[in-house]
Amino acid sequence: MQIITYHELKDKTDLFLLWAKSFGWLCTPKQMDHWVKTDERLIGTPVGVCAIIDGNLAGFVGIMEIPTRNKHGDTEIVGGIWAVSTRPMYARRGVGGYLLEAAEKHFRSKGIRLSLLTTSRTLISYRGYVSFGYREIEKVNSYAHYYKIPQRSAKADPFPPGPKGKAPKLDLEQILSNFDRYARNHCGFTNRLIGALKEQQQMGYFESRYSTVQDDGHLLSSSQMGSLSVWEIIAFKQKTARELIQRAVELSTAGVYVRYVFDPLVAATLEKMSFRKDPGSYGVLMAKPLAGVTIDDIYDDTFLWSSADFF
Ligand SMILES: CC(C)(COP(=O)(O)OP(=O)(O)OC[C@H]1O[C@@H](n2cnc3c(N)ncnc32)[C@H](O)[C@@H]1OP(=O)(O)O)[C@@H](O)C(=O)NCCC(=O)NCCS
């Protein structure tokens, strides 16, 4: 088995197949090439490591270098592992493990002290990550999730067509500015970047038609079968929180699901507006210290992570 970087992989067509089979993610080489040039977390990095067996692409592990804020207020670049995938015909031969090691080797060579990844406890990879030394960041697990299925008339179409017309353009700079203002007193994923935000939008994490941006808060959502999946609500006043939540209810023709609510004001407002609350998630953020440090040496309990920063 040979391990090369994303840049060294000449024909990237099989990455399309690998990601489709692994995550149902349909990303063409041209689309990835675009993000490699625009997502600050990928610019100047190897982007990923690829395993080659008998001339075939056998697996991929993505590499990001993500700026965060540590508990001393300094920028702490962390390693971000993404799109861990092995082609089914090469599974259980150690491909994923070797690639993960290669990615961590890269992080160490850059003096990066922490490797992070997002995964689900329901995936077989979870056990592998634990045996490689990754542990869940508990703080993220303490964020509650909220949901509501607003009453509709008994005769209402269960699958009404979505809104028509031109979708409004979202003010991404305002989203950054709102988030910066909110994150001021936090450590963790506080350094949101415009290129990364554009990528999240292009991937469909939030859609302009189902999102609202104001100068005192925003709602970032996408839609599935008429239900709204809310990735982030930022509000500086309870009135704004109420308006944005009401807007989510109006934009939905079915239910509303608000994931990983990190802000106590938004959480309290959701409860007041009769949303049901459910703790915990299968989706987790995991970390592995790469140098002689612990997570607590780097972050404190003001640690912030928004699902809008999922990688
Ligand atoms: C996860 C994945 C990359 C593992 O790739 P792989 O090359 O087969 O993994 P390895 O052979 O290096 O195994 C690494 C560890 O993962 C775990 N693992 C992998 N496949 C497993 C399986 N079928 N059953 C149980 N554990 C498994 C084991 O802990 C294994 O270590 P072990 O063999 O010492 O027990 C591959 O299954 C995959 O592409 N899955 C679909 C995409 C996905 O879920 N990616 C993770 C997203 S967070």
Image (tube, rainbow, N blue to C red):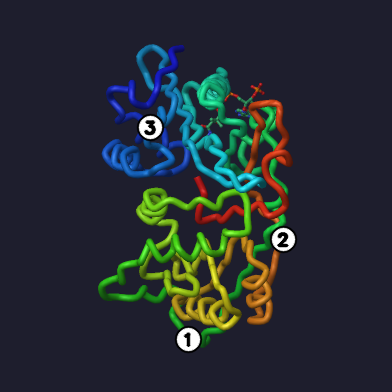
Q: Position of residue 233 (x, y in %)?
A: 54, 68
The residue mark sitting in front, 2 or 1, is 2
Q: Earlier in the sequence, mark 3 or mark 2?
A: 3
Q: Where is residue 23 drawn, in percent x and y? A: 47, 41
Residue 209, visible in the rendered structure: yes
Q: Position of residue 127 (x, y in %)?
A: 68, 32
Residue receiving disc 3: 44
Q: Are marks 3 and 2 in contact (CB under 8 Å)?
A: no
User: Which amino acid, by three-letter code, is at mark 1?
Assistant: Lys
Dot 1 surroundings within 10 Å: few (below 14), some, or many (20 or more)? few
Q: Nearer the viewer, residue 219 or 92?
A: 219
Q: Is residue 79 above or below residue 185?
A: above
169 sits to left or right of 309 = left
- Disc 3 crowd, CA 10 A, few/some/many (<14, 14-19, 20+): few
Q: How many angstroms separate mark 3 from mark 2 (CA)?
A: 38 Å
Q: Amino acid at mark 2?
A: Pro
Residue occupied by mark 2? 279
Quarter of image, ligand 1: top right
Q: Where 91 sits versus 241, above or below?
A: above
Point 41% across, 49% down: residue: 196
**Along the line of sight, which residue is nearer the eye, 244 or 27?**
244
Horizontally, residue 293 falls left or right of residue 2, namely right
Q: Residue at x 47, y 23 (%)?
A: 89
Whether residue 87 appears in this view of the structure is: no
- Residue occupied by mark 1: 155
